[in-house]
Image: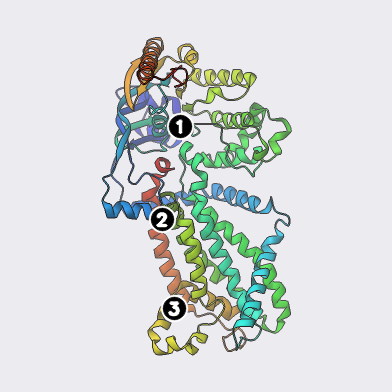
Amino acid sequence: MLPFAAMSATTEAPVASRNAAGTPAAVALLGQGIDEIRSRRRLVRYLVHAEMKKRGSDTLLGNVWWVLDPLLQMAVYVVLVTIIARGLAPDYPLFVFAAILPWKWFSSVVNDATTCVVSRDRLIRQIAFPKIVLPVATATAGVVGFAWGLIPLGLIMLLFIERLTPLVLWIPVIAVVQYVFTLAVAVLVSAANVFFRDLGNITRHGLRLWWYLSPGLYSLDALTQVSIFREHPVLLTVVGMNPFAVLFESYRSVIYGTSDGGLPTSPNLFALVVLLVVSLGLLAASIVVFKRLEANFAKVL
Amino acid sequence: MTHELPRMHAGGTYSIAVDDVGVRYSLRFNRKTTVRESFARVVTRTPADEFWALRDVSFKLLQGESLAVIGPNGAGKSTLLQVLAGIIRPSEGAVDVRGHVSGLLTLGAGFDNELSGRENILLGGAFLGLDDGVIEGLLPSIVEFADLGEFIDVPLKTYSSGMRARLGFAIATSIDPDILLLDEVLAAGDATFREKSKARVVQLVEGAKAVVLVTHDMNWVTEYCNRALLIEKGRVVIEGEPDEVVRVHREHTQEARARKENEARAAGVDPRIAGAR
C-alpha cells in the first residue's frame, strides 16, 4: 500500500491522539470552534427543533404564547407608563412594542443559555461532541421566537397603519446584528454557568437593570430632558454606547418613526455597522473562552 | 479499509495505546461552585485541593481484543472510559486511539425527553457526528433492534428506564464502531434484551472490533473478555488473563470486607448494621 492510501483511510477512521498537551493558541481555538459549528449544522437544527417542541408542549395554549406574551407585556408597560409618565410619545403601544420584541428575544436567549450546557450534563459525560452547538442552538431558537413575534407586531401595525412603510424590510438586517451580539453573550454565559451555578440569578437581575437602562420605554432624546443628563452630557454618550440603545433606536426608526412622533426613517447605519464589528469581535472572544473552558466541562458537570 | 489501517503503522496492530495516563481533578476549579464561594476562596487563598482519578495507567489493546475494566466503585473505571472516548483530556500522558470510537458510554439516558424515539435516533446520530444520510439508513435496523413497538413514535419522557436503555444500546451499537466502549451496559433491560445485547456485543467483538467495557458482572468478564484490567484508587493493580485478574479482585474485595468488619467490631458496632456484610 502507498503511504497516501493510509492517509485516505485516516479520514474514514480518525486516529485520535489525546495528549496532555497545553492549550492551543487563541486563533486555533477560534478556527476550531467555527469549524465545529459549521460541520454540526444538522445537530444545531435538531436541537432547535427539540427546543421548540419543549416550549410548545406542556402548556395550555402552546405556540399561541409566542404571540400572546409580547402583547401582554406591552399592555403592562402601556398601563404603567400612562399612569406614571407624562408627555407620552404618540402611538405609544407601537413605540414600546418595537423594543419589547427584540428584548424578549435577547433576554430569553440569555436566560436559556445559562442552563443550556448544564442541563445536558449527562450527555456531556457520555459523548464527545462539540459543546459549542448548545449555545448556538439556544440563540438560534430565539430567532424562531422573534419570527413568531412579528405576527403580533403586524397586528399592532394594523392599528397604526399610517406608520407602515417599506422600511420595515430593514428589520431582518437589524436582526442579523442582534443575532451576532446575542450569540456572543449566549456562548459566554453558557460556559461560565458551568463553573458558577448561581450565574442565572445574576443574569436575571442584570437583564432587568439593562432593560430599564436601555431606551426601550423611552427614547434616547427623552433623556436630554432629565437634569442629570443635561448636567453631564458624557452620560448620554455612555448610554448611547449600550448595544441595545443602538438596536432599539434602529428597530424603532423603521417600525415606529422618529422620537418626536415623525414617520419611519432609515436606521443609523454607521452605528449598526460599528455594533456589528464590535459584536463579531465579542463573538470571537467568546468562542475562544468557551473552547478554553470546554475541556473541563465533563469533569465539572 | 479501516481494518487495514493498523497494519500501516510499524510496531504493532494495536487499537488503543494508553501511555502513563493520569487525570487530575483540581477541586479548586473543577467543581460546581457559586460566585461567592470562588471569591471567598481567592480572598482567603485556600490551597487548591486536587486528586488523581487516574494515575500511571498504561496498556495496549490489540485488534479483536476485548478488555474488561473492573474494580471497586470510585476506582476510576468510568474516568478511563471517558478518556478513551475523548470526553476528558488526560492531565498527563498520551492516549492513541485508532479507529471510530462508539460515543455512548452509559446507555440509560437517551437524548431528549420531548422528542420521540425515532427523532431521538436522528438526534443521537447528529450528536455522534454521523454524516447526513448515514443515520437515516440505519434507522430501520435501530428501530427493529430496539423493538419498542409503537412507542418508537412517542416522546421519550413516557419511556421506562428499560426502554430507554434498549434505545440507547440500539443506537450505540448500530454504527459498527471500530472500538466499542461500554459502561455497565449489560445490566440494562429485561432478561430477553440482555440476551440480545450480549449476542450483539459478542458479534461486535468477533467482528474484529476492540471492546473496552466496565462491568461488575464477573461471569461476563471470564466468559467473553480475553483480557482484564483491575483498577483501584486510580491505579492499575493487575492486568492480564481475566481468570487471574478476577481472582485478585475477589481477594481484594474480601480483604476490604474483612478490614471493614474488623473496624466496625473495634468500634463496637454490629457489622451487619454497619453495612459491611
In this rendering, the answer to whether A166 lies above or below B41 is: below
Contact, CB < 8 Å: mark 2 with mark 3? no
Q: Is residue A203 above or below residue A153?
A: above
Q: Is residue A9 above or below residue A88?
A: above
Image mark for residue A239? 3
- What residue is pinned by disc 1? B101
Select label 1 or label 3 by which is in front.
3
The 10 Å Cα crowd at callout 3, few under 14, some 14 to 19, many 20 or more, is: some
> For residue A287, which numbered disc appears in the image?
2
Q: Which residue is most to the front?
A: B268
Residue A83: give x, y in percent of width and height.
64, 82
Quick check: can you spot residue B129?
no
Choose between B195 and A78: the one closer to the eye. A78
Secondary structure state at the residue bearing disc 2: helix
Could you say whether the residue bearing mark 3 is in a helix, strand or loop?
helix
Q: Can I make out residue B114 in this image? A: yes
Which amino acid is tagged 1? Answer: Val
The picture places residue B234, in percent across and down from the top left corner, at 33, 28
Residue B170: x percent and y percent? 59, 29
Quadrant of the snapshot with the N terminus of chain A: top left
The chain carrying label 1 is: B
Residue B218, given in percent of the width and then of the height, sits at: 47, 15
The type of residue carrying mark 2 is Ile
Badge 2: residue crowd in 10 Å (few <14, some 14–19, many ≥20): many
